[in-house]
Amino acid sequence: MTHTLTRLAAALLCLPLALGACSDDDDTPDLNQLPAGFGTVKTTSYDGTTDDLLTAGLGKTGIAGAAPTFADPVNPTAAELRRRAIYVNYRALVDFSAGGGYGTLYGPNVTSAGTVTAGEGKIAGKEFIAFADDGTGRKNVGMMVQIPSTFDRTAPCIITAPSSGSRGIYGAIGTSGEWGLKRGCAVAYTDAGKGIGYHDLQADKVNLIDGRLVARATAGKDAHFASDLTGTALTDFNTATPNRFAYKHAHSQQNPEKDWGRNVLDSIRFALWAINEEYAAVDTPSGKHLRSYQAGNVLVIASSVSNGGGESIQAAEQDTEGLIDAVAVSEPNVQPKSMAGVTVTAGGAAVANAGRPLADYFTWRMIYEPCAAISASAQAPTGVRPGWFGGGTAPLGNAFTMVGGVELQTIATNRCQSLADKGLVTGATTAAQADDALAKMRAYGWTDPNHDALHASHYRLADVYVALDYVNAYGRFSVGDNVCGFSLANVDATGNVAAQVAATQAILFATGNGLNTGGDVVYNDSVGGAKLYHVGVSPSTQRMDGSLDGLLCLHDLVKGVDTVTGTPLTGAALARSTRVQAGVQEVLMSGNLRSKPTVIVAGRSDTLLPPNHTARAYAAYNSKVEGAASKLRYYEVLNGQHFDGFNPAAGGVVGYDTLFIPVHHYMNKALDLMWAHMKQQTALPPSQVVRTVPRGGTPGAAPAIAAANVPDIAAAPAAGDTITTAAGAIVIPN
C-alpha cells in the first residue's frame, strides 16, 4: 500500500478537524480502544528543557560527555535509570565522536534538513510505556511511544524503532528514534521480547518495566522477565552453580524472534492509540476519544538497525492489515527461508555459502575465529589490525591483550592446535593453522578484505554472546539446562565465578545490552571447575583453548551432526538439536515484502552480520519471491561495518577510526530518500554500491570526517556501481 498526497488528503477528512470521525456505521462512533493484551500505560510529559524525549535532558553535549551518575547507585530512581539508558543506548549505536560525524553529519543538534545548529537538540513531548502480554506475565514485551510536541496532526506519521541486538526499550533511541522525532513523527518502540529482562538467580531479583530491581515475589506478573526456576529447583540450581543469572532473550523459553514482526505491528497499533488519545476529538456521550487516526491516514515507515531492522522487515512481511507503508532499515538481521534457486555473485565470483541462518554461521565462527585472528593475513588492506591479540607493532586496546589473566594470543594459539588435533584445520605450525582457519572463514562468507582485520575484536567483544544466547533461545531452553556446559555469571580477574556487585546489578537496565552485561559467559565443564569461557580448559584436549568443546557442542546442536566426526547426533544431544533446528525454522523469513517500497542499507565490511548471509542474500531472495512486484532497493556501503560505536578513537576500538565511516549516516539518508518518495513521489535511487573513503591517518588519531568521505547515494549510479537483482540472483560489483 503506497501513500500518495491524494490519498492522504482524502483520508484527512476523517481527522478531528472535522466535528466527527469516520466509521462504518454513521450512528455508531468509532471509539479509541487500547489494543488487546496491553497492560497499564504509564504516561510522562517532558518539557524539552530539564528533560526530553531524545536525550533525557542531557542534550547533544551531555550525550558526548561523561555518563550521568546516580545519587545512590544501589537504589537508582526510575528517572535516573531512564537517563542513563538513553545515554548508553545512544552511544552504543553511533559513532559519538566529533571526528566521526557526531554533531556535524548527525546528532541531536543536526536538524532533519541536515542543518548543523548550535543548540542541544532536546525534544519536548509525551512518552507512553506499557507491557504487551498474553495474560501469563511470561511475555511482557516492552512497548513505548514517543510523541514530540512538533507532531503535525494534519500530516501524521509514525516511525518504528524496535530495539537492536538484545537491547531494551531505548535501544533505537539514537537511530530511527532520533530521525522520527526530528521529523515530528510519533515513534513506536518495542524491545521485541528481549532486553533488558535480567534475573539474578542467587538473590531471586528481577527488573520492573522502569528498570528497578526488586524481589521476584514483589514483582509478580509485572516482572520484565523471571526464569522458570522456582522453589526447590532454584535452590538446587544455586547450590550446584551459585551466582548465576539469566537474561530474557536467551532464557524466556519463548523464542522471541519468531514474534518480532508481530511485536512491531503491535507497537504501531499502540502508537495509533496514543495519537488518538492525544489529538482525536472526544465522543460526548461516552467521554472517550474517537479513533480518527488509522492506518489509512497515517504514514508509517518501519525502520531501525540490526535486529531492529530485521524486526521491521519481518513486520512488513506479516502486515496483512496495511499498517506499514514503507520500510527503511540498516544492517538488518534477515534470514531467508530458502536459498534454493538464489545466488549471490560479488566481484564476478559466486559466493558459495550465502544465506546461512544466523545460528549456523555464529556457532561456526566461534570455532575458527580466534585461530584465524592470529594469521599474519588477518589485517585490513592498509595493514591495520584493530584489537589484534599479539603485542608489538599492531594497534592495541587494553581490553584485547588479556582475559582471566591470560594473553589472548596464548588462547588463540592453543585453539589452533586443538583444531589441528581434531582435523578441523591443517598445518604443522601455528602460522599455517591460523592461515587455514582464516581461509575457512573467508569461504564461509566473510569475503570482504576488511573482515579479516575484525575477527579479533569481534571474537573478544561480541560473537560468543550471540552464539550462545540464540542457541538457547531457538531451543527454548531453561537457564537450568546449562546448554553445552555454559552459563552466565560475574567473574573475577582470573576468570573464576564471583558474586554479583550490587551497584553494578542495580543499574543493568540502564547499562546492559541484554546479552552479557553484568557478567560474562562461563564454561561450567572446564577442567578443574567453572571458568570464564576464554580460559576454559576443554576436557577432550586438556588445553586452555577457549572452551572449544562447548563451542563445538553449540554448532553440533545447530547442524544435527558431530562437527568433528560428521556422524549424526543421537540420544539427548539429538533431542536438543531437534529443538534448536525447529526454533531456527520459526524465524526464517518469507521474502515477501508485499510490494512495499523498501530500502536496505548494509556495510560491506559488516563482520557481525556479513552481507553474504543477510542483506545480499535477502535482496536476492526477495527478487525471486516477489519478482517484478518487488520495490526493494539495496545500498551497500564500502568501508562500513556493524558497530559504529567501535569507531571513536576514545571509547571505541583503536584502529576502527582509520578504516571505517559511520553507516548510521546512510541509514539517515535512506530514511530521507524514503520520506521524499512517500511524500513527493521522488523516485528511489537504484540499488548500488556507495564508494566511501576511509578517514585514514594514524590509528587512534584519524583526521576528522569530511563530506568527501561520505558521498551521497547516487540518483543515477555509474554502471560499475549498480547492483542488479532479478529472479533470485544478485550481482554486486567490486
Image (cartoon, rainbow, N blue to C red):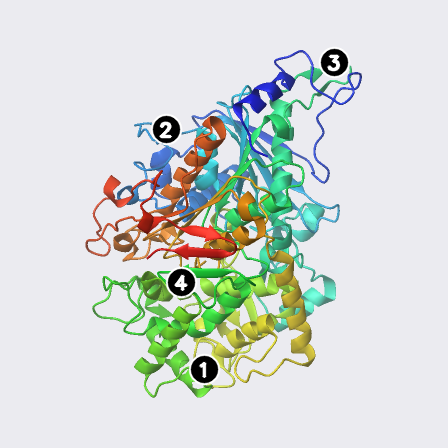
Judged by depth in the image, the label closer to the viewer, 3 or 2, is: 2
As drawn, the label of residue 424 is 1
Judged by depth in the image, the label closer to the viewer, 3 or 1, is: 1
As drawn, the label of residue 113 is 2
Q: Which residue is mark 4?
A: 458
Q: Residue at x 48, y 24 (%)?
A: 47
Whole-number angstrom distance, CA of label 4 to CA of label 1: 21 Å
Sequence-first disc among 3 and 1: 3
Tell me which amino acid carries mark 2: Ala
Whole-number angstrom distance, CA of label 4 to CA of label 3: 59 Å
Image quadrant where one finds the C terminus: bottom left
Task: Answer with left or right where residue 80 lies relative to residue 258.
Answer: left
User: Dot 1: within a 10 Å radius of its alpha carbon, few (fewer than 14), some, or many (20 or more) residues?
Assistant: some
User: Dot 4: within a 10 Å radius of its alpha carbon, few (fewer than 14), some, or many (20 or more) residues?
Assistant: many
User: Dot 2: within a 10 Å radius of its alpha carbon, few (fewer than 14), some, or many (20 or more) residues?
Assistant: few
Whole-number angstrom distance, CA of label 2 to CA of label 1: 53 Å
Sequence-first disc among 2 and 4: 2
Contact? badges 3 and 1 (CB < 8 Å): no
Contact? badges 4 and 1 (CB < 8 Å): no
Image quadrant where one finds the N terminus: top right
From this view, report whether residue 285 is shown above or below residue 580. Answer: above
Judged by depth in the image, the label closer to the viewer, 4 or 1, is: 1
